[in-house]
Amino acid sequence: MSASLVDQPPKADRLLLCATPEAWLNRAVNDLEILLIDHANCEKKAASTALSLMYRYVDYPELLHKMSRLAREELRHFEQVLSLMQRRGIAYRQLSSARYASGLHQFIDKQEPLRLIDTLLVGAIIEARSYERFLVLAPRLDSELQSFYESLLKSEERHYYDYIGLAKHLDEAAVRHRLQDLLVAEAELIKRPDGEFRFHSGVPA
């Protein structure tokens, strides 16, 4: 991992090692119900992750402030997705989880301080992928969804920078050491055939 990537993180979509596959984009356009339901789930899970970090790391003031703001924004996005679904007659329901987040979390070190650093880097990567998918998917959608997804880009990228910044503050050397391995793992999850279509799923099988 080069020093420049850590010192000056690239735009969120340029961090990633692969673009969203065309097959996933085609499936998303034709399965908006599942896309929106799982998008709502992702926003709720993102808020839950932020709150979990706040409870676990109470002696890290910068983290507490950033995660508090992030949780509020993610819950607001959750509410916005629900409202959009209601206007379209889509009922919110439980879906099985994608393998994506669990696939990334298996690489998180079990011991501190690497546990926190890896958790923050995984958070950054997930936010970067969300940004990238909103960016490339929005032009393919109807005007309401396009406008909504484009409106999320600024906050998604800020969340990505917040996670990276918190990890760097703890240990820049560890970020250089760990980030590339996590990005390789993320790219494999995105490029691999996936039996379930979800917001962060891989190539539709």
Image (tube, grey):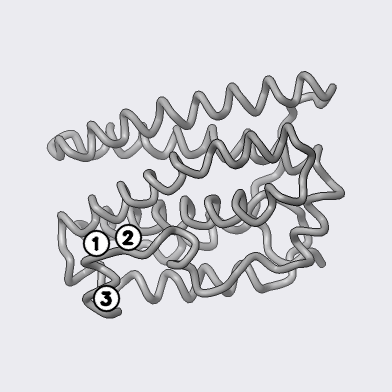
* Crowding near the residue tagged with mark 2, few <14, some 14–19, many ≥20 C-alpha atoms within 10 Å: many
Q: Residue 123, image x and y in percent?
A: 40, 51
Specify the amino acid type for callout 3: His
**Which image quadrant is residue 143 in?**
top right
Spatial CA span between label 1 and label 2: 6 Å
Q: In the picture provided, is 89 more to the left or to the right than 108? A: right
Q: Quadrant of the C terminus?
A: bottom right
Q: Earlier in the sequence, mark 3 or mark 1?
A: 1
* Crowding near the residue tagged with mark 1, few <14, some 14–19, many ≥20 C-alpha atoms within 10 Å: some
Spatial CA span between label 3 and label 2: 10 Å
174 or 82, which is in the foreground? Answer: 82
> Which residue corresponds to the image point at 17% horizontal and 71% vertical from the top-left?
173
Q: Kindly indicate whether the residue at mark 1 contacts the one at mark 3 (C-beta within 8 angstroms).
A: no
Residue under pointer 1: 114
Q: Kindly indicate whether the residue at mark 2 contacts the one at mark 3 (C-beta within 8 angstroms).
A: no
> Which residue corresponds to the image point at 13% horizontal and 37% vertical from the top-left?
59
**Which image quadrant is residue 81 in?**
top right
Specify the amino acid type for callout 1: Leu
Identify the secondary structure beneath mark 2: helix
Q: Residue 25, image x and y in percent?
A: 75, 58
Residue under pointer 2: 118
Identify the secondary structure beneath mark 1: helix
Q: In the picture provided, is 165 more to the left or to the right than 100? A: left
Q: Is residue 11 above or below residue 28?
A: below
Specify the amino acid type for callout 2: Asp
Identify the secondary structure beneath mark 3: helix
Q: Earlier in the sequence, mark 3 or mark 2?
A: 2
Residue 177 is tagged as: 3
Spatial CA span between label 3 and label 1: 11 Å
